[in-house]
C-alpha cells in the first residue's frame, strides 16, 4: 500500500537522501516506517491517520548527516520534522505537512563523562534511565525526571523544554543543559551555550541563546549533541503523602510546604478529588482510604542524610499542620517510586453510563500561579463535564498541580487536568468537539494570567492558535527570530502559529 | 476484557489458509482477533516497553518496538498497511516477553481488569499470517522445510541433525527408553551443546531419579510456532504427545526453558483438557534435589561468576529464584548477582528465530550482554538455557578480553564430582558415526 507524498519529495530526493545517509536501511520511505512515526501518546484522530504521516524517515548517526539533509531540505523547500522518543503529549514530533522526519534514536552514544567539571556529553537519542544506569557507578546522575523517564529521550526533552518531577530541587531540562550542538534550519552546525563556553553554567557574553534553543518545539533546529549537568547521586530520598478532607486545606498546606525554605524539597504534588476518584477505580493504594479523603498532597526531598533527615521532620509537621493525615511509609514510598507509571491507564476509561472502555490520555499542562488554582480547577472541571455530557466520549480523570519553578518550589505550578478520550469513537465531529474543549480549557488559563503549556509545547490545534494571544507584545519578536533563522519555513512547519511569520505583513 | 479462551492462531474458516489473491480475508480475521488487545497498547502509547526491548536497544528503529507491533494492527484496521508492509517489523523480536512485563497496563491495572498486553502472542500470530499469505521469510522457510523433513530442528550451521542421532548425546549413560518419567531433550541441547544435556541427565542419575527417553523424539515444535509455522508445530506436538502416551508417561522433565514454554503454553492450547502430563522444569527439579540432599555438591568450583537470567525463565515464567539458589549452593563460587528486574532488559538474542533471520542483531545483543558481565569483573557468565549459551559463548570468545560462558547444570555437575563429557560448542564431526 502507499499514501502519496505530501511535500516535494520524489524518488530523486530519496536517492539524494541515500547519497547522504548511505544505503544501509537508514532512509525509509516505506509505509510501515511512516505509519509508526505519525503519532505521539496524546489523543490522536485515528480516522485521519494518513494526514499526519511524514513522507520519508531518516535515521542519522551524525550531526554532519543531519546538516546535509537539512541543507537539502532547505534548498528544495521540504519540511523537516525532528523526532526523538515520540513520547511527547503534544505534536512537536508529528509531521503536519509531510516531509522528512529526522528520527535521532540512533544518535544515543555517551561521548564523554567529565567527573571533574561535572558534565556528561551525549547524543540526543539517549534515554535518561539508560544514561543514569551508566552514570550510577560514578556516583552521579542526570536529574531530569519526567513521568516519561523510562522512555523519553534527551533530544525531545530539549526540544520541548521539558519539566521534571524533581525540578524544584534540581532544575528542569533547560537548567540541566549546559550547552548543545544544533543544526540550524539552513543546515549550519552551531554550538550554543553560555557565552562561548561548552561547560560553563553562567556567562554574560553575547546573548543568552541557550534559552532560545531549549523549548522551541523543533521549530528552530535539531539538537545533535548535548552537554548535560551531572549532579551528585542523592544519599537519601524522602517522600510523604498526606490526605485531606477538602481541596482548600490541601491547597493551603501545599503553599506552606513550598514556602518552607527547605533546600532539599524537590517537588510538591497536589491531587484533587476527581483524581482521587480516578485512582480509586481500581488502585489498591487508594481503595483502602476512607471516602472522606478528597485531596492528597505528596512531597519529595532529595539530598544528603545530614540535610534530609532533619528536614523531613519539618515536612511532617507542615503536612499535618492543617489537619493533613499522613498516609504511611508504604504508600508514601511506594507511590512516589511508581510516579512514572501510575497516573494514566487506558483501562480506567469510563463511558457516560459507567462502562469500562479503553481511552487515551490528554494531559493539559498549563503554568499557573498558586493564587488562582482553586478557581481554575472549578472552571476546568465544568468545561470537561459539559463536553462529557454532550458527546459521551470524554472522561474527567482529575487534576494534579505540581511545583513548576526550577530550584524554587513556590509561586507557580504545572497544572494538569487529565481527560480520557474514547479514540475508537472519534470522527470529524467528535474530534472538532475535542479541539474546542481543549481550547476552552486554554482560554481559562489565559484569563487567569497563565501560560497554556508549561512543558508539552503548543503544537496542536486547540492551543497552537492561541500562542499569539499569549505572547502578546513579544509575538513580533518571536516571528522575527523564526523568519531570520528559518527563512523558508521548513523546520517543523505548522506549529505554534509560526506560519504567521511568513504571511504578508507577518513581520512588522 | 481479554478473551482468555481464544484459540491460538488463526481461524482458517475451513479454507486452506493460503491467500494468493490477497483478498484480505485472513488479514481481516487477524485484525478482528487482535484489535482489542492492540488497542490497549495503542491508546496507552506510553512506550515504557521500548528501552527494555533487546532488539530495539540495538536497532533503535521505532518499527521494531512492541508499540509498533500493536499500532500496525490498528493501522491495518484503518486500511493504511497490509501484511506485506509490516512483515519485516515482526521479524525483529526474540519473544523474550520483557515488553509485557514493563507494560503499565499490565503492571498497574492488569490484575483488576484481567488484562495482560499480549505482545509475544501477537508476534507469533502475525508470523503465522505472514506464512499463510505468502509473506514468509526465506531463512525461516528453509529452516522449517528441514524440520518437516527430519523432525528435528536443523540447528544453526552445519551440525548434522537426524532422528538416527537424536540420542547420541547419551552415549554410555545407559538411559532406558520409556517409563513414567520422560526426559525431553531440546534439539540445540541434543545436537549442539550436548554437555548441557549430559550434565543434567547425570545429575538425575546421581540423585537416583528414574527416567527414560522417548522412543522417537521429535522437536517440541515451539520454534516452528514462534516463526509462524502453526501446522508444522502442531504436527510435532501431536507426535510427541502420542509417543509419551505410548510408553505410559505421566511426567515430562524439560531442562530447556524453550521446551518448558512449549509444554506449558502451546500444548495446553492445542489440547485443552485432553493433556494429562505433569511438566517439570529442570532447574527447579535439580535445585530441589540439592536442597533435599539427594545431590551433594562437594567439589569446590573456584570461580567468580554472574548469572544470566534466560528470558524464558525470568521474563516469561517468573523463574529467577531457583537458579540463584542452585548457584549459591555451589561451594567455592563467588557470585556477583544482578537482580532479575534489571535483567528484564537483558537478553542473548538467541530466541524467537532471530538468529536465523537476523544473526547480526543476535550477535550484537550477546556482545552487549557479555560486556555488562565484564563490568562486574567476573571470570565466567553462567546461563541456564542452551539457546542463549551459543551466542553468548561466541560473544565471550570474541571479546577483547574473552569471557567463558558456562551452563548452570554443567557447573553443578562439576561441583557434584561428575565428569560430564559431550561438547559445549557443536560436535566434532569425525567423532560421529
Image: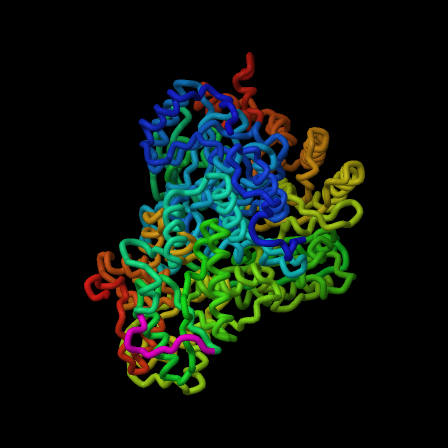
Q: Residue at x 32, y 47 (%)?
A: B360
Q: Residue furthest front?
A: B246
Task: State the quadrant of the C terminus of chain B.
Answer: bottom left
Is residue A120 visible in the rendered structure shown here? no
Nearer to me, A401 or A456: A456
Instruction: Report x, y in % for residue B116.
Output: 60, 56
Nearer to me, A169 or A34: A34
> Is B135 drawn above or below residue B258 in the view shown?
above
Instruction: Report x, y in % for residue A255.
Output: 66, 53
Q: Which residues are magenta?
A: B169-179
Nearer to me, B383 or A376: B383
> Is B132 drawn above or below residue B243 in the view shown?
above
Q: Residue at x 69, y 64 (%)?
A: A320
- Classify residue A366 as left or right of residue A393: left
Is residue B276 visible in the rendered structure shown here? yes
- Classify residue B293 as left or right of residue A380: left
Q: Residue at x 50, y 66 (%)?
A: B242
Instruction: Report x, y in % for residue B317.
Output: 50, 65
- Classify residue B403 as left or right of residue A307: left
> Is A263 drawn above or below residue A187 in the view shown?
below
Q: Residue A18: within the magenta?
A: no
Q: Quadrant of residue B147?
A: bottom left
Nearer to me, A173 or A460: A460
Amino acid at each position: 500500500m502507499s499514501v502519496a507524498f505530501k511535500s516535494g519529495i520524489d524518488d530523486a530526493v530519496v536517492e539524494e537522501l541515500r547519497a547522504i545517509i548511505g544505503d544501509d536501511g537508514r532512509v525509509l520511505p516505506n509505509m510501515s516506517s511512516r505509519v509508526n512515526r505519525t503519532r505521539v501518546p496524546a489523543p490522536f484522530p485515528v480516522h485521519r491517520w494518513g494526514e499526519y504521516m511524514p513522507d520519508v524517515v531518516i535515521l542519522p548517526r551524525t550531526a554532519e548527516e543531519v546538516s546535509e539533509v537539512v541543507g537539502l531540505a532547505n534548498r528544495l523547500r521540504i519540511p523537516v520534522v525532528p523526532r526523538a522518543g515520540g513520547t511527547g503529549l503534544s505534536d512537536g514530533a508529528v509531521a503536519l505537512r509531510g516531509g522528512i522526519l529526522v528520527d535521532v534514536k540512533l544518535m544515543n552514544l555517551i561521548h564523554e563523562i567529565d567527573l571533574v567539571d561535572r558534565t556528561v556529553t551525549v547524543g540526543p537519542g539517549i534515554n535518561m534511565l539508560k544514561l543514569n544506569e551508566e552514570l550510577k557507578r560514578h556516583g552521579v546522575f542526570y536529574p531530569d525526571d519526567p513521568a516519561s523517564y523510562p522512555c523519553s529521550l534527551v533530544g525531545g526533552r530539549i526540544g520541548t523544554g521539558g519539566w521534571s518531577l524533581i525540578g524544584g530541587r534540581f532544575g528542569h531540562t533547560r537548567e540541566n543543559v549546559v550547552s548543545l550542538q544544533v543544526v540550524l534550519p539552513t543546515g549550519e552546525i552551531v554550538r550554543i551555550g553560555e557565552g562561548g563556553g561548552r561547560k560553563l553554567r553562567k556567562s554574560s557574553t553575547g546573548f543568552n541563546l541557550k534559552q532560545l534553543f531549549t523549548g522551541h518545539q523543533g521549530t528552530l533546529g535539531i539538537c545533535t549533541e548535548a552537554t548535560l549537568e551531572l549532579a551528585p547521586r542523592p544519599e537519601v530520598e524522602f517522600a510523604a503523602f498526606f490526605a485531606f478532607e477538602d481541596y482548600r486545606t490541601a491547597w493551603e498546606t501545599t503553599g506552606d510546604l513550598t514556602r518552607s525554605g527547605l533546600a532539599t524539597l524537590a517537588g510538591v504534588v497536589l491531587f484533587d478529588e476527581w483524581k482521587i476518584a480516578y485512582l480509586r477505580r481500581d488502585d489498591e493504594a487508594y481503595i483502602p482510604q476512607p471516602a472522606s479523603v478528597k485531596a492528597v498532597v505528596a512531597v519529595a526531598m532529595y539530598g544528603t542524610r545530614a540535610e534530609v533527615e532533619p528536614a523531613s521532620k519539618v515536612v511532617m509537621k507542615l503536612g499535618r499542620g492543617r489537619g493533613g493525615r499522613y498516609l504511611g511509609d508504604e504508600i508514601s514510598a511506594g507511590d512516589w517510586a511508581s510516579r512514572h507509571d501510575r497516573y494514566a491507564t487506558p483501562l480506567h476509561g469510563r463511558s457516560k453510563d459507567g462502562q469500562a472502555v479503553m481511552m487515551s490520555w490528554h494531559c493539559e499542562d498549563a503554568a499557573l500561579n498558586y493564587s488562582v488554582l482553586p478557581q481554575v480547577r472549578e472552571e476546568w472541571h465544568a468545561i470537561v463535564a459539559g463536553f462529557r455530557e454532550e458527546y459521551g466520549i470524554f472522561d474527567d480523570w482529575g487534576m494534579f498541580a505540581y511545583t513548576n519553578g526550577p530550584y524554587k518550589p513556590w509561586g507557580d505550578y504545572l497544572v494538569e487536568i487529565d481527560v480520557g478520550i474514547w479514540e475508537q469513537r472519534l470522527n470529524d465531529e467528535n474530534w472538532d468537539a475535542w479541539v474546542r474543549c481543549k481550547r476552552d480549557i486554554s482560554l481559562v488559563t489565559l484569563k487567569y494570567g497563565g501560560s497554556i503549556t508549561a512543558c508539552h509545547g503548543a503544537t496542536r490545534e486547540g492551543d497552537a492558535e492561541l500562542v499569539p494571544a499569549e505572547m502578546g507584545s513579544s509575538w513580533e519578536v518571536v516571528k522575527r527570530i523564526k523568519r531570520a533563522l528559518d527563512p523558508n519555513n521548513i523546520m517543523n512547519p505548522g506549529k505554534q502559529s509560526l506560519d504567521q511569520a511568513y504571511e504578508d505583513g507577518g513581520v512588522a | 476484557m481479554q478473551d482468555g479462551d481464544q484459540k491460538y492462531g488463526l481461524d482458517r474458516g475451513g479454507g486452506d489458509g493460503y491467500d494468493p489473491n490477497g483478498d484480505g480475508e485472513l488479514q481481516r480475521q487477524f485484525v478482528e482477533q487482535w484489535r482489542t488487545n492492540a488497542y490497549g497498547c495503542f491508546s496507552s502509547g506510553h512506550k515504557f516497553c521500548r528501552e527494555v526491548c533487546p532488539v530495539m536497544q540495538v536497532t533503535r528503529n521505532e518499527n521494531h518496538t512492541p508499540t509498533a507491533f500493536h499500532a500496525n494492527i490498528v493501522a491495518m484496521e484503518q486500511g493504511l498497511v497490509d501484511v506485506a508492509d509490516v512483515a519485516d517489523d515482526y521479524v525483529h523480536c526474540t519473544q523474550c516477553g520483557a515488553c509485557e512485563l514493563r507494560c503499565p497496563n499490565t503492571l498497574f491495572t492488569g490484575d483488576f481488569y484481567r488484562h495482560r498486553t499480549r505482545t509475544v502472542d501477537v508476534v507469533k500470530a502475525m508470523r503465522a499470517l505472514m506464512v499463510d499469505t505468502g509473506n514468509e521469510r526465506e531463512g525461516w522457510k528453509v529452516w522449517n522445510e528441514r524440520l518437516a523433513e527430519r523432525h528435528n530442528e536443523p540447528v544453526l550451521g552445519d551440525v548434522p541433525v537426524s532422528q538416527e542421532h537424536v540420542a547420541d548425546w547419551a552415549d554410555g549413560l545407559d538411559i532406558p527408553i520409556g517409563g513414567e518419567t520422560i526426559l525431553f531433550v531440546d534439539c540445540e541441547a541434543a545436537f549442539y551443546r550436548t554437555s548441557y544435556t549430559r550434565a543434567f541427565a547425570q545429575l538425575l542419575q546421581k540423585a537416583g531419579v528414574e527416567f527414560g527417553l522417548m522412543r522417537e523424539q521429535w522437536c517440541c515444535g515451539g520454534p516452528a510456532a514462534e516463526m509462524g509455522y502453526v501446522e508444522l508445530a502442531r504436527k510435532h506436538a501431536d507426535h510427541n504427545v502420542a509417543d509419551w502416551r505410548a510408553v505410559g508417561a505421566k511426567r515430562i522433565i524439560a531442562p530447556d526453558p524453550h521446551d518448558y514454554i512449549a509444554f506449558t503454553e502451546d500444548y495446553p492450547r492445542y489440547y485443552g483438557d485432553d493433556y494429562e502430563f505433569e511438566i517439570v522444569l529442570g532447574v527447579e527439579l535439580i535445585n530441589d534435589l540439592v536442597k533435599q540432599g539427594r545431590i551433594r555438591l562437594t567439589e569446590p568450583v573456584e570461580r567468580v561468576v554472574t548469572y544470566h537470567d534466560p528470558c524464558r525463565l525470568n521474563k516469561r515464567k517468573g523463574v529467577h529464584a531457583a537458579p540463584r539458589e542452585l548457584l549459591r549452593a555451589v561451594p567455592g563460587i563467588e557470585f556477583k548477582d544482578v537482580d532479575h528486574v534489571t535483567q528484564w532488559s537483558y537478553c542473548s538474542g538467541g530466541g524467537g528465530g532471530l538468529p536465523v533471520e537476523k544473526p547480526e542483531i543476535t550477535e550484537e545483543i550477546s556482545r552487549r550482554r557479555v560486556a555488562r558481565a565484564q563490568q562486574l569483573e567476573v571470570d565466567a557468565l553462567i546461563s541456564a538455557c542452551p539457546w542463549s549459551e551459543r551466542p553468548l559463548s561466541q560473544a565471550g570468545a570474541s571479546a577483547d578480553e574473552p569471557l567463558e560462558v558456562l551452563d548452570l547444570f554443567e557447573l553443578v555437575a562439576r561441583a557434584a564430582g561428575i565428569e560430564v563429557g559431550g561438547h559445549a560448542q557443536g560436535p566434532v564431526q569425525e567423532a560421529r558415526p
